[in-house]
Image (tube, rainbow, N blue to C red):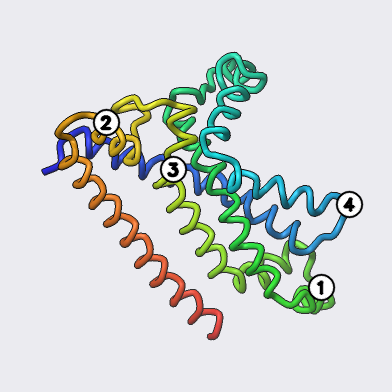
């Protein structure tokens, strides 16, 4: 059986992952569209910066977040003056998870946008639709499966994020201890293997449920597009 601390870790992981995805999805769509539809000096540099969290060690990302968003950081210090604190808070875990999952979201959505013929948007423009109206009415429905795929990837990455999170917000039970952190804590003490295994099974169950739901939603989206 799972104890209260394990359920707290699950609830916090779901809260952190959902917050990370919801907050980063609009920016991921915008960046993906910009990279897919625009060519400009520095395009490759921007693309590399977006994908940087995938190649940097997660601990390095967490340390950079601590330098920037800690209470004495150049961003975190200013935010702390207005009552917004990320370091060693669950909001910091959401920030770290969002940054780590952002490249996966952008990649999936960008590939989906690139698969849409730009002439469809041009045809909508000739019929009087503005740029944003053409995107909302033509492109957005067609890239729905890509957005869903990016959302699932970002959520899965957030649920499994460990290195950047534990570096930035530590492993405080009930406050910043997510499922991966709780598993690590159980494995660090003698006799904790059983509790760790139960959390592993719980994590796998949540991941499978997320994939099944995404598959069901993807089929519904595809049916609507075909219709």
For the point 63% across and 67% down, the residue is: 140
In-front residue for pair 168/76: 168
Closer to the chain start, of discs 4 and 3, is 4
- Asked whether disc 1 touches disc 4, contact meaning CB atoms under 8 Å apart, the reply is no
Element type at mark 2 = loop
Residue placed most toward the observer, 59 or 203: 59
Picture quarter with the N terminus: top left
Please tell me whether mark 1 sits on a helix, a strand or a loop. Answer: helix
Mark 4, secondary structure of its residue: loop
* Residue at 81%, 53% in the rendered image: 43
Spatial CA distance of label 2 from label 4 is: 49 Å
Give the numbered dot on residue 161. Answer: 3
Identify the mark nearer the N-term, 2 or 4.
Answer: 4
Q: Which residue is mark 2?
A: 188
Q: Residues within 10 Å of mark 4 (few under 14, many from 20)?
A: few
The residue identified by callout 4 is: 41
Q: Which residue is mark 1?
A: 125
Q: Nearer the viewer, mark 2 or mark 4?
A: 2
Q: Are marks 2 and 4 in contact (CB under 8 Å)?
A: no
Along the line of sight, the residue nearer the viewer: 55 or 78: 55
Front label number (2 vs 1): 2
Q: Which comes before the other along the chain, label 3 or label 1?
A: 1
The residue carrying pointer 3 sits among few (fewer than 14), some (14 to 19) or many (20 or more) residues within 10 Å by Cα, namely: many
SS type, badge 3 = loop
Q: Quadrant of residue 107?
A: bottom right
Instruction: Work out how far the residue at label 4 is from the one at label 3, CA to CA, in angstroms.
Output: 33 Å
């Amino acid at each position: 059986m799972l104890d209260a601390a394990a359920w707290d870790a699950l609830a916090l992981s779901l809260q952190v992952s959902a917050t990370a995805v919801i907050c980063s999805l609009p920016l991921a769509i915008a960046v993906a569209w910009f990279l897919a539809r625009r060519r400009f000096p520095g395009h490759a540099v921007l693309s590399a910066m977006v994908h940087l969290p995938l190649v940097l060690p997660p601990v390095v990302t967490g340390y950079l977040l601590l330098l920037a968003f800690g209470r004495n950081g150049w961003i975190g210090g200013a935010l702390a003056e207005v009552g917004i604190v990320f370091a060693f808070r669950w909001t910091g875990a959401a920030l770290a998870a969002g940054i780590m999952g952002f490249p996966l979201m952008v990649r999936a959505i960008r590939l989906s946008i690139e698969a849409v013929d730009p002439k469809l948007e041009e045809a909508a423009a000739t019929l009087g639709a503005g740029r944003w109206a053409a995107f909302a009415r033509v492109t957005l429905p067609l890239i729905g499966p890509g957005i869903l795929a990016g959302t699932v990837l970002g959520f899965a990455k957030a649920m499994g994020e460990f290195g950047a999170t534990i570096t930035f917000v530590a492993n405080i039970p009930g406050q910043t201890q997510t499922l991966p952190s709780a598993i690590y804590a159980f494995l660090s003490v003698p006799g904790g293997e059983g509790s760790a295994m139960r959390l592993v099974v719980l994590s796998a169950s949540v991941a499978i449920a997320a994939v099944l739901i995404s598959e069901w939603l993807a089929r519904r989206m595809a049916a609507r597009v075909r219709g």
